[in-house]
Image (tube, rainbow, N blue to C red):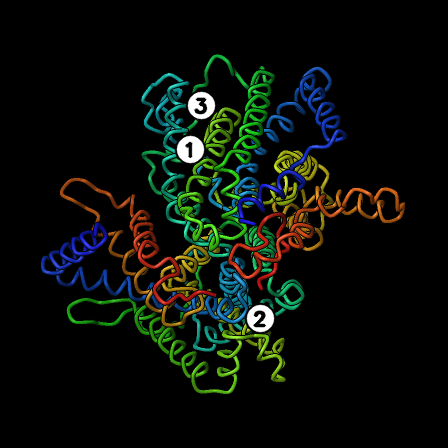
């Protein structure tokens, strides 16, 4: 009841804001949607791994950030002459290959890293989900510390190809090209590919069967360990890819691993663990709430944008109050 | 037999029972702790023992929730951060270095801090109490990170870079020049918390809580309000964590968002796991191990390029944590139990006492086969439970 009133109040407030400042509102909404696209790519990998293996990969944020760093290092070393990390601003021309080769490289390597983690630390204790979560927490601690040791505390960003436009005209305002075309496009493409993979291929059929009944699947002669390895590889690759996209769209720097772990957690808590449509809805909800709350928490002279984090918190509470397992969640 | 009776029976003969040897050990440890300021130098008393005592209080709130409620909570550090920030903001801070600096007396600040933290704990408990196992872990981690980012963003409450020089009551005094009073305060709080938790688990509420842990479905059908029991247990855990939060501010003389970040969240988890999640005492054992590793790792770590050097404390603690979780999920106490059982097996006579009751994780699962298949089954002792 309270929640319904709250929800209606928020919608009314947003409608008023939309009527007041059309183009600002559109821009803020686009910010939210592009952010949601990035969150979706991160959370899709997280939820894929959980859905099949019941492994909560707490190192997912670390894989995200490591992916960003790998692409950044690859780009600076291979395509910018590897001169210095102290240069200010983009001074080198980055070709299309200078963006895509590091992207593919980082994505693939992170997939392998994830596969290594799964084979070394998670394969032999399948089913002990709490222990596996703690193992991945330990790995994330080590990763976070090693990344600070090797890449320092400076915030960097990966360069998009110089030939790409920096912004495009949408209606009456210009909007960053990379955010709205590349990231959003990539998220839609990944969503579509994952949908086809899960719904239309033999691999997807096996994965779906594995989600429902692992023991029976194994008894039918399917090599479940191979399926697990494949799913973990794909899930980790998505984290790495998101790291590269996020590193270009926003930045790469220490602390982002935690932030994106939290974002992935919120997305799957809202959407329901193990559900891809849930991840999409959850990402959209979180992206929009974060985006609106950084702009629209001004009430007259009272500026509450500092408290924006509470908006995401209220979102999580509201969903959990109605559906403890998330919107698309179902009991294990 | 009902789940309550089951739990009660397990309680009488289970790992809770303190043996004569246990009492003797406790007495020795107690005497050593009482005269510690006389036998150890002040650095040890302050940096290792005092720190271990308040970290142990933080960790025991987690151990309690896991051992008796089947809830592995990652929100304990967030809750102690709430207590610390609430107190630091209302009491007097020197030169108004961040925070609201309302100038309340220290003891009023303590009451306020603990009160706010308990209310937040009640809210968090109400949110998370309907989730079990790994979902509970995830939700409490998310709540913990919310608190961290909240204090990171709301600089009115956290000051830029923390609330510093928080005033302390006269009982504690200046912790830099005279660390001994704070040591005894931490020791007293630890004993009180330990006694409180041991008492609570013997009350009807505590027994019902263990029933909820073992078989929520059956307890529900017996008419118990399962989420309420879990929420109240979580609130009690929040109270204990809040005490640790107050002590941590006195110990550090300040609090900043960095003191409740994910590293600290994980540190408290690590302490609880190192000590063993199956016994309350393990929390302090783990805390001492953590403080000692902390102290020596910062001085005596060999340098291997960027990979390993004295600055890489987090890497070392991560590796220790990883090894513990991989090799002995029951922590140091679990290792002790394993050694004892190995000895018992070697010299058959020692095996007269059922050895498996020493190690909660493996032993108790066999005791409660009926509970298998429920979400919380086997979350009693250690972490080596399996889903059915």
Q: Is residue A150 visible?
A: no
Position of B377 with respect to A274 (left or right) is right
Looking at the picture, tell me which residue is in the foreground, B135 or B79.
Answer: B135
Badge 1: residue crowd in 10 Å (few <14, some 14–19, many ≥20): many
Mark 2 crowdedness (10 Å alpha carbons): few <14, some 14-19, many ≥20: many
Q: Position of residue B334 (x, y in %)?
A: 71, 45
What residue is pinned by disc 3? B165
- Secondary structure, mark 1, is loop
According to the picture, the residue beneath numbered tag 1 turns out to be: B162
* Chain for disc number 3: B
Residue B326 shows in the view: yes
Horizontal and vertical percent for residue A190?
41, 76
Residue, far right: B347
Measured Cα–Cα span from mark 1 to mark 2: 39 Å
Image quarter of residue A42: bottom left
Disc 3 vs disc 1: Cβ atoms closer than 8 Å? no
Residue A12 pos. (x, y %): 13, 56
Identify the residue shown where x is 9% and y is 57%. A20
Query: Dot 3 lies on which element?
Result: loop
Q: Which residue is mark 2?
A: A109
Q: Nearer the viewer, residue B166 or A90?
A: B166
Position of residue A185 relative to residue B288, above or below, is below
Q: Residue placed at 56% from the left, 54% from the top?
A: A137
Query: Would you place residue B24 above or below residue B380 in this image?
Result: above
Marks 3 and 1, how far apart at CA? 10 Å
Question: Would you say the residues marked 1 and 2 are in contact, meaning their CB atoms lie under 8 Å apart?
Answer: no
Same chain assignment for discs 1 and 2: no
Specify the label residue B310 is tagged with: none
């Amino acid at each position: 009841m309270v929640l319904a009133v709250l929800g209606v109040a928020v919608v009314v407030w947003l409608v008023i804001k939309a009527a007041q400042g059309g183009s600002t509102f559109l821009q803020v909404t686009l910010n939210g949607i592009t952010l949601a696209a990035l969150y979706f790519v991160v959370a899709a990998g997280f939820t894929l791994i959980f859905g099949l293996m019941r492994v909560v990969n707490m190192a997912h944020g670390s894989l995200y950030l490591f992916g960003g760093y790998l692409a950044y290092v690859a780009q600076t070393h291979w395509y910018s002459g590897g001169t210095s990390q102290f240069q200010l601003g983009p001074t080198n021309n980055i070709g299309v290959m200078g963006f895509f080769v590091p992207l593919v490289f980082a994505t693939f390597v992170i997939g392998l890293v994830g596969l290594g983690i799964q084979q070394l630390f998670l394969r032999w204790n399948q089913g002990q989900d709490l222990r596996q979560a703690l193992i991945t927490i330990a790995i994330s601690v080590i990763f976070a510390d090693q990344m600070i040791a090797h890449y320092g505390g400076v915030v960097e960003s990966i360069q998009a190809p110089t030939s790409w436009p920096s912004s495009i005209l949408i209606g009456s305002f210009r909007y960053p090209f990379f955010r709205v075309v590349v990231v959003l496009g990539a998220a839609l493409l990944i969503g579509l590919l994952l949908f086809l993979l899960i719904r239309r291929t033999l691999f997807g059929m096996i994965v779906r069967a594995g989600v429902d009944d692992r023991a029976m699947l194994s008894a039918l002669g399917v090599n479940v360990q191979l399926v697990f390895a494949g799913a973990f590889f794909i899930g980790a690759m998505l984290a790495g890819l998101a790291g590269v996209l996020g590193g270009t769209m926003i930045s790469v720097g220490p602390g982002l691993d935690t932030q994106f772990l939290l974002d992935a957690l919120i997305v799957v808590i809202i959407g329901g663990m193990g559900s891809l449509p849930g991840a999409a809805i959850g990402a959209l909800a979180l992206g929009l709430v974060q985006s609106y709350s950084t702009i629209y928490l001004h009430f007259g002279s009272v500026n509450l944008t500092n408290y924006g984090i509470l908006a995401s918190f209220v979102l999580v509470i509201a969903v959990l109050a109605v559906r403890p397992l998330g919107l698309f969640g179902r009991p294990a | 037999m009902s789940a309550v009776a089951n739990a009660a029976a397990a309680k009488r003969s289970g790992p809770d029972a303190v043996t004569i040897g246990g009492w003797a050990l406790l007495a020795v440890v107690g005497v050593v702790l009482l005269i510690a300021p006389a036998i150890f130098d002040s650095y040890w008393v302050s940096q290792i023992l005092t720190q271990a005592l308040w970290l142990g209080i933080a960790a025991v709130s987690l151990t309690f929730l896991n051992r008796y409620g089947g809830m592995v909570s990652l929100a304990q550090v967030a809750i102690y951060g709430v207590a610390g920030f609430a107190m630091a903001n209302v009491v007097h801070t020197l030169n108004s270095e961040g925070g609201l600096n309302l100038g309340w007396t220290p003891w009023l600040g303590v009451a306020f801090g603990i009160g706010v933290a308990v209310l937040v704990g009640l809210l968090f408990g109400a949110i998370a109490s309907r989730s079990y196992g790994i979902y509970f872990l995830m939700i409490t981690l998310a709540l913990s990170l919310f608190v961290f980012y909240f204090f990171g963003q709301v600089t009115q409450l956290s000051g830029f870079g923390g609330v510093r020089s928080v005033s302390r009551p006269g009982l504690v005094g200046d912790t830099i020049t005279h660390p001994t009073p704070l040591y005894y305060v931490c020791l007293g709080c630890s004993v009180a918390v330990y006694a409180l938790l041991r008492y609570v688990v013997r009350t009807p509420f505590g027994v019902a809580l263990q029933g909820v842990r073992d078989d929520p479905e059956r307890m529900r059908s017996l008419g118990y309000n399962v989420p309420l029991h879990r929420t109240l247990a979580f609130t009690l855990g929040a109270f204990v964590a809040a005490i640790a939060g107050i002590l941590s501010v006195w110990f550090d003389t300040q609090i900043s968002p960095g003191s409740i970040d994910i590293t600290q969240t994980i540190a408290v988890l690590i302490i609880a796991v190192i000590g063993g999640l199956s016994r309350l005492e393990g929390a302090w054992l783990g805390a001492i191990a953590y403080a000692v590793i902390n102290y020596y790792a910062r001085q005596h770590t060999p340098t291997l390029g960027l990979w390993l050097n004295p600055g890489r404390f987090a890497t070392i603690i991560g590796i220790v944590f990883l090894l513990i979780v991989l090799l002995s999920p029951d922590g140091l106490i679990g290792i002790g139990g394993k050694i004892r059982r190995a000895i018992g097996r070697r010299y058959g006579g020692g095996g007269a006492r059922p050895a498996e009751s020493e190690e909660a994780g493996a032993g108790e699962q066999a005791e409660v086969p009926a509970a298998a298949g429920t979400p919380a089954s086997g979350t009693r002792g250690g972490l080596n439970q399996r889903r059915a």
